Image (cartoon, rainbow, N blue to C red):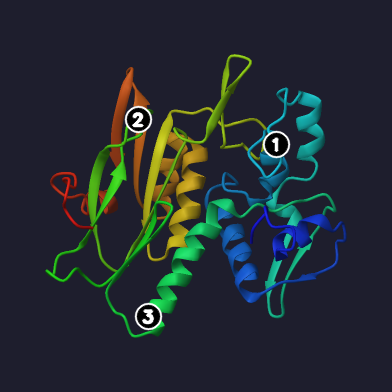
Amino acid sequence: MSTYIATSELSRFNDQQSTDWFAVSSETAAVVALALEINAQTDGAFDVTVGPLVDLWGFGPQRRPAQLPTEADIARTLEFVGSDKLEARLAPPALRKLAGGLRVDLSAIAKGHGVDRVAGVLEGLGIDAYFVEIGGEVRTQGRRLDGEAWRVGIEKPAEGERAVQNAVGLYDQALATSGNYRNFYEQDGKRINHFIDPKTGFPVENDLVSVSVIADNCALADALATGLMASGYDKSLRIAEIHNLAAMMIVKKNGGLEVMATAQFEKLILPSPTVEGDKP
């Protein structure tokens, strides 16, 4: 599912221009199918066909452009963006483009899927209590040896420091956080973040700084956190309420930051953040 490895299934799918079905592994087909479901749930905010725009703005495998994209560049690229131009089937597993120039980027869901795959290996070995973490995405099963839930810290979205904003207690659940305070660059006096709006082609500018989602599996949590982050606070809160999501949002408000959580998430927040030396 890598866009950085030229021989990966996804890279080979992206490089070909055909609109015929392209055979892939069952795992890749399932991840793309889930991505299309999340696209619908988030009213298009989560869109794995945003790959060409990600590359255009310098967040893909290629080098960052010397100049920011023009409106003409963005308009040309948008012709090949949109989940309505992508299909996935599970039997036999395959993907299909409805526009030859379409490119898929699974960066916002494949890492969560990787966590789930590791969890599956552990469960296959008969391990019924574990804590799996890859790059900030977490999946838990069972409880700690002391019988307590696993403690997971959610990072405070502050540049230049690492601190815990909140901690939650999880068991048999996954957690993913998406934010705009790490992956960005500044050019021509503008701060460019890596969340690209698949409808406008421009980086997202909204009042959200960070979104955390708790779900049954990490691929789902990963994708939802990204989709909500790209939606802005009002829309993301509406989506969370409609789909009964456990979500926490850190919002820019009144010159500072405020933490807003749905009732499903609120009940999992621990009384105080994890302290130094405490175990997960």
Judged left or right of residue 1, residue 249 is: left
The reply to whether residue 245 is visible in this rendering is no
Mark 3 lies on a secondary structure that is helix
- Identify the residue position indicated by label 2 in the image: 158
The reply to whether residue 179 is visible in this rendering is yes
Mark 1 lies on a secondary structure that is loop
Judged left or right of residue 16, residue 70 is: left
User: What's the residue at 53%, 27% (across, down)?
Assistant: 205
- Identify the residue position indicated by label 3 in the image: 123
User: What's the residue at 33%, 64% (across, down)?
Assistant: 173
**Image quadrant in which the N terminus is located:** bottom right
- Identify the residue position indicated by label 1 in the image: 63
User: What's the residue at 69%, 53% (across, down)?
Assistant: 104
Q: Are marks 2 and 1 in contact (CB under 8 Å)?
A: no
Please tell me how crowded label 1 is: few (under 14), some (14-19), or many (20+) other residues with Cα within 10 Å: few
Please tell me how crowded label 3 is: few (under 14), some (14-19), or many (20+) other residues with Cα within 10 Å: some
Q: Quick one: label 3 or label 2, which is nearer the N terminus?
A: 3
Task: Tell me the mark number nearer the camera, choosing from 2 and 1.
Answer: 1
Q: Pick the residue in front: 172 or 45.
A: 172
Where residue 36 appears, as percent x and y from the top left, is 61, 58
Q: Are marks 3 and 2 in contact (CB under 8 Å)?
A: no
Q: Pick the residue in front: 4 or 36.
A: 4
| Residues at marks 2 and 1, CA–CA distance in whole angstroms | 27 Å
Q: What amino acid type should be assigned to the residue bearing mark 1?
A: Arg
Q: Pick the residue in front: 27 or 39.
A: 27
Q: Are marks 1 and 3 in contact (CB under 8 Å)?
A: no
| Residues at marks 3 and 2, CA–CA distance in whole angstroms | 36 Å
Q: What amino acid type should be assigned to the residue bearing mark 3?
A: Glu
Mark 2 lies on a secondary structure that is loop
Judged left or right of residue 245, residue 200 is: right
Q: Is residue 175 above or below residue 276?
A: below
